[in-house]
Amino acid sequence: KTSQILIDDSCNIGISATILYDTKMESHSSLGDKSLLMKGETLSRDTQWLGSPAQYYQPISTYEPVAGISEEIIDVTSS
């Protein structure tokens, strides 16, 4: 049996977040630190999700930093 995890452009996945199979993160969606994206779920474009299981928090257009969303950018391409 095979399944997919689809992550579109410019998504944010928080530290220690878990993403289960058959899920999709649409462009510019954000999954908070230590959050759990359950199987079969889709995070809509330009939205933030927090918690375990992940619950809708707010659209990115009204973004205000909150606990659980990492502001740090990590460069994984450098050696």
Image: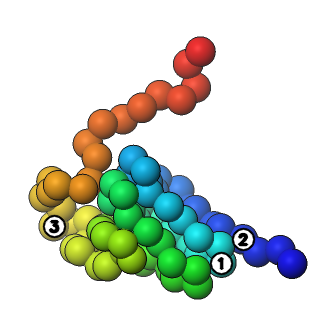
Name which residue lies at 36% across and 57% down: 34
- x and y, in percent, of residue 55 in the image: 32, 79
Quarter of the image containing the C terminus? top right
Q: Which residue is mark 2?
A: 4
63 sits to left or right of 2: left
Please tell me the numbered disc located at residue 62.
3
Graded by Cα atoms within 10 Å as few (under 14), some (14 to 19) or many (20 or more), the crowding at tag 1 reads: some
Graded by Cα atoms within 10 Å as few (under 14), some (14 to 19) or many (20 or more), the crowding at tag 3 reads: few
Q: Residue furthest bottom?
A: 40
- x and y, in percent, of residue 56 in the image: 29, 79
- x and y, in percent, of residue 30 in the image: 37, 61
Please tell me the numbered disc located at residue 48.
none
* Colour setting: rainbow
Q: Earlier in the sequence, mark 2 or mark 1?
A: 2
In the figure, 10 relative to 59: above or below? above
In the figure, 30 relative to 54: above or below? above
User: Which of 6/37 is in front?
Assistant: 37
Please tell me the numbered disc located at residue 22.
1
Q: Earlier in the sequence, mark 3 or mark 2?
A: 2
At mark 1, the secondary structure is: loop
Graded by Cα atoms within 10 Å as few (under 14), some (14 to 19) or many (20 or more), the crowding at tag 2 reads: few
Name which residue lies at 58% across and 80% down: 39
Name which residue lies at 53% across and 56% down: 9
Q: Earlier in the sequence, mark 1 or mark 3?
A: 1
> Can I make out residue 30 in this image?
no
75 sits to left or right of 78: left
| Eye-nearest disc, 1 or 3 | 1
Cα gap from disc 3 to disc 2, whole angstroms: 30 Å
Cα gap from disc 2 to disc 1, whole angstroms: 5 Å
Cα gap from disc 1 to disc 3, whole angstroms: 28 Å
